[in-house]
Amino acid sequence: VFTGVKLYPANATTNSAAGVTDYGKVMHVLERMEKIGMPFLMHGEDVDPEIDIFDREAMFIERYLSKWVRQFPGLRFILEHLSSKDGVDFVRSAAPQVGGTITPYHLILTRTDWLGWGLKPYMYCMPVIKTAKDRAALRKAATSGEACYFLGTDSAPHPVAKKLSVNGIPGLFNAPVAIETYANVFEEEGALDRLEAFASLNGPKHYRLPPNEERITLEKSPWTAPEEVKVEGPDEKALVYRGGETIEWKVVAS
Ligand SMILES: [Zn+2]
């Protein structure tokens, strides 16, 4: 059973070498998805080499997505892992047809954290972490309660050897601390009462699925995140986002 289709532009992120190179070729797929009510998920970046890496999301919107929303008015879109103010603003302007997910790390990091005091390879992800202005827009959007923004962790446990390489691969493994990190951001923004909508209700609503019946309980109780976890393969480990840091919130029951 397929519930959705995600677009990966060729070479936009890890394992996407066989992605789409010519969008003209997939327009009939979008037409069909619009007819049958299947949502369209996107890694929304234009990887034209002429485009600066920090503008990839904005240019994908300008060149493609802004046209597709008019061309396929009945299609529901999800712009995954929003990373810029341009992305946030576009989703708001195109809601409810378009929804956008936001990762924990795009709510916390800036490119200065990533590049400003030594290169932090584990912070390298696609779309890349952007400026403090972008982060502010993302935090405001996530904690606004607006139904068009919802949780998406985009968690990629790549082996350390592939991250710390001459040609390191993108991906930020945050699953072990994701919901706890969102909780901290919502607390800092005085919006804990909106965390449930962001994490559990807005997404299913956009997908027209019933919300999950199961519940988790979060408690403010500090713990230390593991620095790394074992992943598949002999002696393979993945670095954990916020590994070794004190995590303020803890899942106490699920
Ligand atoms: Zn992606």
Image (spheres, helix red, strand yellow):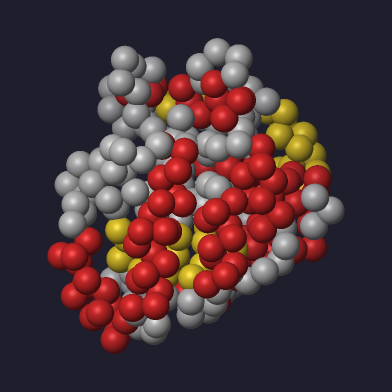
Q: Nearer the viewer, residue 249 or 203?
A: 203
Q: Position of residue 216 (x, y in %)?
A: 66, 58
Q: Nearer the viewer, residue 115 or 160?
A: 115
Q: Position of residue 85 (x, y in %)?
A: 59, 51
**In the figure, residue 75 lies in which quadrant?**
bottom left
Residue shown at 71% from the left, 66% from the top: 145
Residue shown at 35% from the left, 71% from the top: 68
User: Relative to 156, is 221 on the left or the right?
Assistant: right
Q: Position of residue 201 (x, y in %)?
A: 61, 71
Residue shown at 28% from the left, 37% from the top: 49
How many discs mark residues in the rendered view?
A: 0
Relative to residue 152, is residue 170 depicted above or below? above
Residue 4 in view of the camera: yes
User: Relative to 93, is 16 on the left or the right?
Assistant: left
Quadrant containing the C terminus is: bottom right
User: Relative to 37, is 103 on the left or the right?
Assistant: right
